[in-house]
Amino acid sequence: MSRRWALRLSPRTTTLVALLAGVLLLPALGALVWQRLAPAPCDEPLTFRIDINRADAAELALLPGVGPALAARIIDDRSKRGDFENVAALRRVKGIGGAISQGVAPFVRVDLTTR
């Protein structure tokens, strides 16, 4: 006669085992999901650059860290104080510091010859 061995766990122990399994498996599952949802890397170079001395509010709002309100302040500053001489000159606008200035640098250009 064969005897079957059954593992009998209390509800508390079962809950602890389930929590432990979840804690151990959740990071792996999250990484798998992230790999499927993350966009594929792009090897193409940036193809657009906005001239900060000619751009309207809608174009400026496309820049990283610049929303509609900040775009309006950029245009207001530009109309009152004149063109920006370089990207770093954006820092004269209230709300633009070093982080935003550096963040938008790859996406902007300054053209002082066409006015």
Image: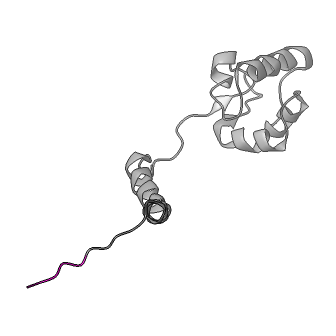
Is residue 2 covered in magenta? yes
Q: Is residue 115 visible?
A: no
Could you say which is closer to the camera, residue 48 or residue 92? 92
* Residue 59: image location, x then y, percent: 63, 22
Q: Residue at x 48, y 60 (%)?
A: 19
Q: Residue at x 37, y 50 (%)?
A: 36
Q: Quadrant of the C terminus?
A: top right
The answer to whether residue 69 is above or below residue 101 is above
* Residue 5: image location, x then y, percent: 24, 78
Could you say which is closer to the camera, residue 111 or residue 4? 4
* Residue 99: image location, x then y, percent: 79, 44
Q: Residue furthest bottom?
A: 1
Q: Residue at x 48, y 61 (%)?
A: 12
| Magenta part, dominant SS | loop
Q: Would residue 30 appear left or right of 112 to someone viewing this image?
A: left
Which of the 4 quarters of the picture holds residue 104?
Answer: top right
Magenta span covers which residues? 1-5
Q: Is residue 4 visible?
A: yes
Q: Residue at x 77, y 28 (%)?
A: 112
